């Protein structure tokens, strides 16, 4: 756990030109610091400042994966509806074979879609932490 530090008591104030402020704020917005004062304190005390880096290809991949996830959900829903309709036709002997065959395929599809969704969520969580 972090040790409790006494509250800051001393103030340091200085004025900057609007262009300087824009530059400082631009640098600050690229970091993981939550407040400008935290960023300024780290810079002035020569402590490390963590800079966020955006990976455009990862952003594009994430967008494509989200779209793929939506499409997989739609395919899974359509397949479930089709199997449900086959179950309604179970009384006809010719359809019993189809029902049994598609029941197995439905289970396999659901398992695979869930695996894909789980992996996509893991990738998304990893991406958010960067």
Image (cartoon, rainbow, N blue to C red):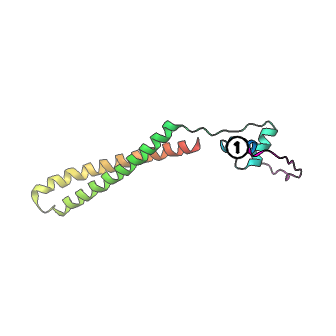
Q: Quadrant of residue 92?
A: bottom left
Residue 1 appears in the picture as rendered: no
Q: Give the residue number, with chain letter if any, for mark 1.
A: 28
Q: Main secondary structure of the magenta part?
A: loop
What crowding class fits label 1: few (fewer than 14 Cα within 10 Å), some (14-19), or many (20 or more)? Answer: many
The structure residue drawn at horizontal position 36% and vertical position 48%, both measured from the top left corner, is: 113
Rendering coords of residue 82 (x, y %): 23, 57
Q: Which residues are magenta?
A: 1-18
Which quadrant of the rendered structure holds the C terminus? Answer: top right
Residue 16 colored magenta?
Answer: yes
Rendering coords of residue 1 (x, y %): 74, 48
Rendering coords of residue 26 (x, y %): 68, 42
Residue 7 colored magenta?
Answer: yes
Is residue 62 or residue 4 the one in the foreground?
Answer: 62
Q: Residue furthest front?
A: 18
| Horizontal side of residue 10 vs 30, given as left or right | right
């Amino acid at each position: 756990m972090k040790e409790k530090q006494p509250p800051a008591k001393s103030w340091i104030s200085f004025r900057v030109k609007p262009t300087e402020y824009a530059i400082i704020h631009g640098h600050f917005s690229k970091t993981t610091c939550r407040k400008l004062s935290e960023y300024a304190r780290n810079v002035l005390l020569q402590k490390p400042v963590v800079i966020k880096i955006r990976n455009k290809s990862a952003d594009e991949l994430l967008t494509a994966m989200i779209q793929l996830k939506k499409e997989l959900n739609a395919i899974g829903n359509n397949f479930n509806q089709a199997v449900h309709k086959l179950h309604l036709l179970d009384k006809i002997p010719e359809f019993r074979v189809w029902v049994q065959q598609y029941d197995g395929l439905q289970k396999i599809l659901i398992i695979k879609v869930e695996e894909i969704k789980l992996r996509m969520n893991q990738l998304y969580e990893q991406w958010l932490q960067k």
